[in-house]
Image: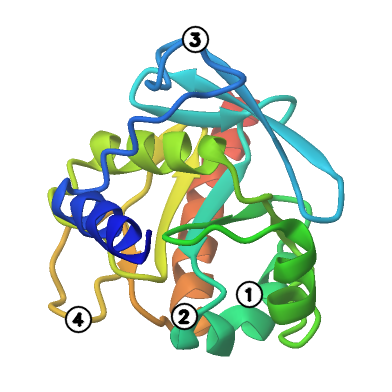
Amino acid sequence: MKYIWIILITLFFLSGCTNKEKSAILESNEFALGDKIEITSVQGATFTFTRVEGGIVQEGKEDNVIIFDIFGTFCEPCKKEAPALMNLQLKYLDNVTLVGLSYFEDVDEKYIIENFSKPYNAHYFIAKNSDKNKILVDAITKDIGYPNLISLPFKVVLKGGKYQNVTDVWENKDGVKYYIGGINTSVIEKDLDTILKVKQVRQWHIKRI
């Protein structure tokens, strides 16, 4: 039995994490245009996300910023940055939704709370570990054209359903739409301020017209 599990895990990684598994919400494994998916946090809160052209929006807050944080409770950089992410969520509570999606592991909500949320003050929205997480991650990597097996933590930022360019701290490239690895939240804050400022300027311009 032990060897069977080793083979299955090996095949999972070699497949590039396509995550072709059944979903209780979606009829297919693909998060298709117009589909809705409801995810529940480890604390029992629920968010609904809708698939739009080229991205994802939060139902009821379609113009808000969403940060999807793909992480693992076993991941040391994820643990290290969790308290700062909590502070980030509190600072931008009115404009930003931070969503943690556990990945590459099979742990229940009690384990996540006891081994991640409590010890690292990660009390933002962390989704229960389910097939829905995998469907969302597949949609995200497909949208941004990310060809590799992701490394944790891995984050994307959307506003109004559009993926935003963010600071590339590793190679200083332009047009990068993801953070990979542990990122100082001051970098994320700077990007968020730019994203939100653009939104505010546009709203002011519309009012002036």
Of the two numbered discs 4 and 2 in the rendering, the one whose residue sits closer to the viewer: 2
- Circle 4 packing at 10 Å, graded few (<14), some (14-19), many (20+), is few
The residue at the point 50 percent across, 69 percent down is 72
Q: How many marks?
A: 4
Q: Label 4: state its secondary structure.
A: loop
User: Of 202 and 148, which appears nearest the observer?
Assistant: 148
Quarter of the N terminus within the rendering: bottom left
Q: Tell me whether circle 4 and circle 3 mark residues in contact (CB < 8 Å).
A: no
On the rendered structure, is 127 left or right of 6? right
Q: Which of the marked residues, 1 or 3, is nearer the chain's N terminus?
A: 3
Q: Quadrant of residue 18?
A: top left
Q: Position of residue 133 (x, y in %)?
A: 52, 43
The residue at the point 53 percent across, 16 percent down is 26
Q: Label 1: state its secondary structure.
A: helix
Distance CA(mark 1)–CA(mark 2): 15 Å
Quarter of the C terminus within the rendering: top right
Q: Is residue 161 above or below residue 36?
A: below
The residue at the point 42 percent across, 14 percent down is 28
User: Of 3 and 72, which appears nearest the observer?
Assistant: 3
Of the two numbered discs 1 and 2 in the rendering, the one whose residue sits closer to the viewer: 2
Q: Tell me whether circle 4 and circle 2 mark residues in contact (CB < 8 Å).
A: no
Q: Tell me whether circle 1 and circle 3 mark residues in contact (CB < 8 Å).
A: no
Of the two numbered discs 1 and 3 in the rendering, the one whose residue sits closer to the viewer: 3
Q: Position of residue 190 (x, y in %)?
A: 47, 73
Q: Which of the marked residues, 4 or 2, is nearer the chain's N terminus?
A: 2
User: Of 208 and 105, which appears nearest the observer?
Assistant: 105
Residue assigned mark 4: 170
Give the label on residue 75, or none: 2
Q: Position of residue 100 (x, y in %)?
A: 60, 58
